[in-house]
C-alpha cells in the first residue's frame, strides 16, 4: 500500500471524527424543543397532506390538536375527513371530540337567467383578473364571475360550473369543508358553513351589500335588505350587514321560516322536505322553500341581448 | 428641425388610423344632467363637500382631495345638485358621483374668462404648484397621476428638463394633436409655466414624426417669439409605439434610463402631458380649474369621428350618438386607445379627467383570434420596451408563482401591450402579466408594511 492512500485515509478519518463531534454539540445546542405528542398525533393521521382539514398539512393539524388540547382540554371542531379522530384523542389522553361537519356554500344565485348578461367578457379565465376589470357580465359588482377559480383550486373535485346557470355548484358528497375555495374567491362569495342536522341548512344566497335599488337593477334574486326575515326569525339568528341579511349558523335552528317570507327568494333552505300541497296552511300558496339542487330559477321576462364586449 | 430620436429597446408599429386628425375641435353641447365621479385620479377619491339641493357654479369646488396622491374635483357646470349616488364608471364598478341638473353657465368667482393670450406669469414656483393642486390638475394622458405631485421636486434632486409628452403614440387618438394645432400659444405658455414651477430653463416637446404639421407649427411659433419662448425646443421622435411611455420618452430625448422602481425625477426629468400643460396654463393664468378636456370619438365603423371639447361628467353615450351612434351588431367600446385602453361594460359612463378617447370597434376588429401554443419565437421579448421576457412572466403568473414574477421584474412592466400585439400565437400575455403584477404588488406592499 502506498503512503498516499494511508495519509488520505487518516486525514479523512480524523476530519470525519472531528466534524461528527462538532455536529453533535451543535445539534444539542440548537435543538428545537417540540412536544413529542405532535409526532404521535401526526402518526395517527393519514399523512396525505390533502388540506381537507383546513390546515396546511397533517402536521399542522396535529399541532393544532395538541395546542387546543393543552388550552381547552378538547379537540372539538378539528377533524380529518379521512380518519377517525378518536385515535388522535386517545394519544392526547382525551375522549373523542365533537366535530360538526362543514360544507362550502356558494352564496350567489345570479346565474344566466337571474342576472342576464349585459356584456360579453373575453380575456384570461381567472376570476381574480376579471375582478379588476369590471363588475361582471350581469352587472352585479359583488356577484359570481363564473370563471371558476374555486373549481381549479378544489383538491377534492367537489366543485364544478353548472353549464346552465354558469355558477359553481358544490357536490355535497365530495366536499370536506376545507375552505380553500372560500379563500380563493376574490369576492368572498363562498362560505364554509356547518352541514346542519340531517344536512338541512338555511343561508342567504347573496353577498351584495349595495342598496336594494341597485341590486334589483342587476339581479332578480339578490337580497335587498328588506329585513322581513329579521323580524320573522324566532331565534334572533339573522343580522344585517349593510343592506344584506346574514344568518348566523351558530344561532340558526334551521326552521326555514325566513325562507318562506323572503320576497326575493334569496334565502335558500336546503334539503327540507318539499311542502305538501294538501297541508291547509300552505294551500294555494306557492311553495316558498327552495330545494336544492332542483331549485327553479325565477323566470326573466325580457331577454337582454349583449351589447358590448369586454376584452382585456 | 432637430434630428429624429427614439428609444432603442423593443417597440412595435401598429396601424396609426388617425382618422380624426384633420377634424377641428367641436364644443360639445351641455347635457341636461351631468354625473361627476368623485374619484377622477389615481389615488384616493375626493371627499364630497356639497349636499343634495345645493346650487353650484361652474368651476366651484365640490370635492376636496383626500391624502397626498389625490386631486380636487370641481363642478363642470352651473346647476342644482340632484343627488349624490353611485354610478357605473369606466372601471366597470359603481363609484360615488355627484349628479348635477345643468343650467346656463355662470362662472365661479375669480375665474378670468378671456380668449386673449396672457403672457405675464405673476406667480412664483411655489404658488404655481399650489395653484395646480388647487385646480385639481392630473396627468390627462390616461393614468391620471396628480400633476402637483410630479412638480414637487424632492430635496436633493434637481429637475433639469421639463419634457412635454406630445408623442401620442396610441393609434386612433388625436386629442393632443388637435390641441397643439389649435391652442399653440397657450400650450407654449403652459410649458413656460411648468419650467418656472420646477426652476429650469430647458423645456423639450417630444412629438412623433407622423404629426409633422404640429412640429412645423410649433417650430415656427417658437422662432417668431424667440424672447417669449426661450429655452423651449421641439424634438421630433420616430413613430413607434410606446414612444409616449414616460420612461421611453425620457430615454429617447435625454438618453437616460429611469432606474428600476424609481421615479423619473431620478433622471432629472419632469414629464407632463399636452392636455395637462394646457390645463396648467388655464389654471395659473386664468384661475380656471380643470373641468373640461378634448375627447376623441373614433373607430373605423364610426360614421362621424370627431374631437369634442367635453365637460367632465358628460355621459359617453351622448358623444357616441354625436359621432353617428353605435355601429350595428356587437361592439367593443374602449375608454382610451386600442393599445392601453380598457373596454367598458356600460356605454353611459361619465367622461372624466383621464378619458382621452372613446374607441368603437366591431366584433371583427376586436375579437381575440384563436389562441394557440407558444412557439418560443421570442417576438414578445424583442418587442418589450422594458427588456422583460413576457412569455416567461405569462407562464409563471399562470402558475401563481409570484416569487418568480418578482425576480423577473414584473413590476417594471408598463403594460403597453406590445408583447400581446406582436404574439403570433394570440396568447393574452398582458392579461396574465397584469394579473401577476397585481398579485406581486400586493405581496410586496404587505412585506414592506411588516
Image: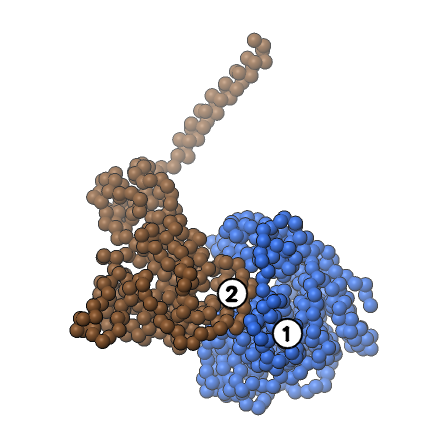
Chain colours: A brown, B blue
> What residue is shown at x 75% (from left), y 68% (from top)?
B210
Disc 2 packing (10 Å; few <14; some 14–19; many ≥20): many
Q: Is residue B411 visible?
A: no
Mark 1 = which residue?
Answer: B301
> What residue is shown at x 40% (from left), y 56% (from top)?
A160
Disc 1 packing (10 Å; few <14; some 14–19; many ≥20): some
- Percent coordinates x, y for residue B186 in the rendering: 72, 79
Q: Quadrant of residue B415?
A: bottom right
- Percent coordinates x, y for residue A273 in the rendering: 23, 63
In this view, the mark in front (2 or 1): 1
Tell me the quadrant of the picture where the C terminus of chain A can be found.
Answer: bottom right
Q: Are marks 2 and 1 on the same chain?
A: no
Q: Nearer the viewer, residue A95 or B262?
A: A95
Tell me the quadrant of the picture where the N terminus of chain A can be found.
Answer: top right
> What residue is shown at x 63% (from left), y 56% (from top)?
B423
> What residue is shown at x 73% (from left), y 77% (from top)?
B22
Q: Quadrant of residue B385?
A: bottom right
- Percent coordinates x, y for residue B343 in the rendering: 56, 68
Mark 2 = which residue?
Answer: A121
The answer for how far apart the CA atoms under marks 2 and 1 are is 21 Å
Report the side of A276 relative to A297 (left or right): left
Q: In the orientation shown, which residue stands out farthest toward the left?
A: A280
Q: In the orientation shown, which residue stands out farthest toward the top?
A: A1
Q: Is residue A264 visible?
A: yes
- Dot 2: element: strand
Amino acid at each position: 500500500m502506498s503512503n498516499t492512500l494511508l495519509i488520505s485515509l487518516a486525514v479523512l478519518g480524523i476530519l470525519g471524527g472531528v466534524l461528527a463531534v462538532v455536529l453533535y454539540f451543535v445539534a444539542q445546542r440548537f435543538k428545537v424543543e417540540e412536544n413529542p405528542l405532535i409526532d404521535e398525533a401526526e402518526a395517527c393521521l393519514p399523512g396525505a397532506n390533502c388540506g381537507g382539514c383546513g390546515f396546511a398539512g397533517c402536521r399542522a393539524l396535529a399541532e393544532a390538536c395538541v395546542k387546543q388540547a393543552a388550552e381547552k382540554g378538547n379537540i372539538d371542531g378539528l377533524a380529518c375527513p379521512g380518519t377517525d379522530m378518536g385515535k388522535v384523542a386517545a394519544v392526547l389522553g382525551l375522549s373523542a371530540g365533537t366535530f360538526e361537519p362543514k360544507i362550502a356554500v356558494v352564496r350567489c344565485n345570479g346565474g344566466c337567467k337571474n342576472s342576464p348578461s349585459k356584456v360579453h367578457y373575453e380575456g384570461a379565465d381567472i376570476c381574480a383578473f376579471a375582478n379588476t376589470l369590471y363588475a361582471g357580465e350581469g352587472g352585479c359588482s359583488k356577484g359570481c364571475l363564473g370563471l371558476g377559480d374555486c373549481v381549479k383550486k378544489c383538491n377534492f373535485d367537489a366543485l364544478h360550473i353548472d353549464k346552465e346557470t354558469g355558477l359553481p355548484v358544490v357536490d355535497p358528497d365530495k366536499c370536506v369543508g376545507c375552505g380553500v375555495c372560500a379563500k380563493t374567491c376574490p369576492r368572498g362569495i363562498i362560505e364554509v358553513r356547518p352541514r346542519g342536522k340531517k344536512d338541512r341548512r338555511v343561508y342567504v344566497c347573496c353577498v351584495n351589500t349595495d342598496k336594494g335599488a341597485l341590486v334589483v337593477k342587476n339581479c332578480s334574486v339578490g337580497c335587498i335588505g328588506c329585513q322581513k326575515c329579521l323580524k320573522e326569525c324566532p331565534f334572533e339568528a339573522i343580522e344585517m350587514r349593510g343592506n344584506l341579511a346574514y344568518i348566523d349558523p351558530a344561532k340558526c335552528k334551521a326552521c326555514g321560516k325566513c325562507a318562506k317570507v323572503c320576497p326575493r327568494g334569496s334565502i335558500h333552505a336546503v334539503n327540507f322536505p318539499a311542502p305538501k300541497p294538501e297541508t291547509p296552511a300552505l294551500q294555494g300558496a306557492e311553495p316558498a322553500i327552495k330545494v336544492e339542487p332542483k331549485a327553479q330559477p325565477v323566470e326573466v321576462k325580457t331577454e337582454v341581448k349583449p351589447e358590448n364586449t369586454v376584452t382585456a | 428641425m432637430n434630428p429624429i430620436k427614439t428609444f432603442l429597446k423593443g417597440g412595435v408599429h401598429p396601424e396609426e388610423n388617425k382618422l380624426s386628425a384633420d377634424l377641428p375641435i367641436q364644443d360639445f353641447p351641455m347635457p341636461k344632467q351631468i354625473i361627476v365621479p368623485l374619484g377622477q385620479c389615481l389615488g384616493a377619491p375626493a371627499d364630497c363637500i356639497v349636499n343634495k339641493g345645493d346650487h353650484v357654479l361652474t368651476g366651484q369646488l365640490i370635492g376636496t382631495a383626500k391624502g397626498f396622491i389625490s386631486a380636487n374635483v370641481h363642478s363642470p357646470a352651473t346647476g342644482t345638485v340632484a343627488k349624490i349616488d353611485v354610478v357605473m364608471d369606466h372601471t366597470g364598478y359603481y363609484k360615488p358621483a355627484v349628479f348635477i341638473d345643468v343650467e346656463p353657465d355662470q362662472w365661479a368667482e375669480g375665474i378670468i374668462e378671456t380668449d386673449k393670450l396672457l403672457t405675464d406669469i405673476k406667480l412664483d414656483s411655489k404658488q404655481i404648484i399650489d395653484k395646480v393642486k388647487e385646480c385639481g390638475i392630473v396627468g390627462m394622458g390616461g393614468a391620471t397621476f396628480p400633476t402637483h405631485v410630479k412638480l414637487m421636486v424632492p430635496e436633493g434632486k434637481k429637475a433639469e428638463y421639463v419634457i412635454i409628452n406630445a408623442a401620442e403614440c396610441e393609434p386612433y387618438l388625436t386629442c393632443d394633436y388637435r390641441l397643439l394645432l389649435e391652442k399653440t400659444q397657450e400650450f407654449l405658455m403652459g410649458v413656460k409655466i411648468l419650467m418656472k414651477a420646477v426652476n429650469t430653463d430647458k423645456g423639450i416637446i417630444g412629438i412623433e414624426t407622423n404629426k409633422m404639421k404640429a412640429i412645423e407649427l410649433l417650430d415656427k411659433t417658437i422662432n417668431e417669439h424667440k424672447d417669449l419662448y426661450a429655452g423651449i425646443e421641439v424634438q421630433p421622435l420616430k413613430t413607434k409605439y410606446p414612444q409616449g411611455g414616460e420612461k421611453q420618452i425620457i430615454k429617447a430625448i435625454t438618453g437616460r434610463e429611469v432606474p428600476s422602481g424609481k421615479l423619473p425625477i431620478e433622471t432629472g426629468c419632469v414629464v407632463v402631458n399636452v392636455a395637462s400643460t394646457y390645463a396648467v396654463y388655464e389654471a395659473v393664468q386664468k384661475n380656471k380649474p380643470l373641468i373640461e378636456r378634448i375627447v376623441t370619438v373614433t373607430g373605423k365603423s364610426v360614421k362621424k369621428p370627431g374631437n369634442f371639447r367635453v365637460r367632465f361628467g358628460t355621459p359617453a353615450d351622448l358623444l357616441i350618438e354625436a359621432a353617428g351612434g353605435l355601429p350595428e351588431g356587437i361592439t367593443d367600446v374602449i375608454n382610451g386607445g386600442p393599445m392601453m385602453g380598457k373596454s367598458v361594460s356600460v356605454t353611459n359612463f361619465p367622461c372624466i379627467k383621464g378619458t382621452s378617447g372613446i374607441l368603437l370597434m366591431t366584433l371583427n376588429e376586436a375579437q381575440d383570434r384563436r389562441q394557440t401554443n407558444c412557439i418560443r419565437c421570442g417576438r414578445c421579448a424583442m418587442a418589450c420596451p422594458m427588456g422583460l421576457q413576457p412569455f416567461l412572466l405569462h407562464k409563471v403568473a399562470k402558475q401563481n408563482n409570484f416569487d418568480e414574477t418578482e425576480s423577473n421584474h414584473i413590476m417594471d412592466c408598463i403594460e403597453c401591450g406590445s408583447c400581446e400585439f406582436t404574439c403570433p400565437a394570440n396568447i393574452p400575455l398582458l392579461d396574465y402579466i397584469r394579473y401577476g403584477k397585481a398579485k406581486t404588488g400586493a405581496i410586496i406592499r404587505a412585506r414592506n408594511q411588516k
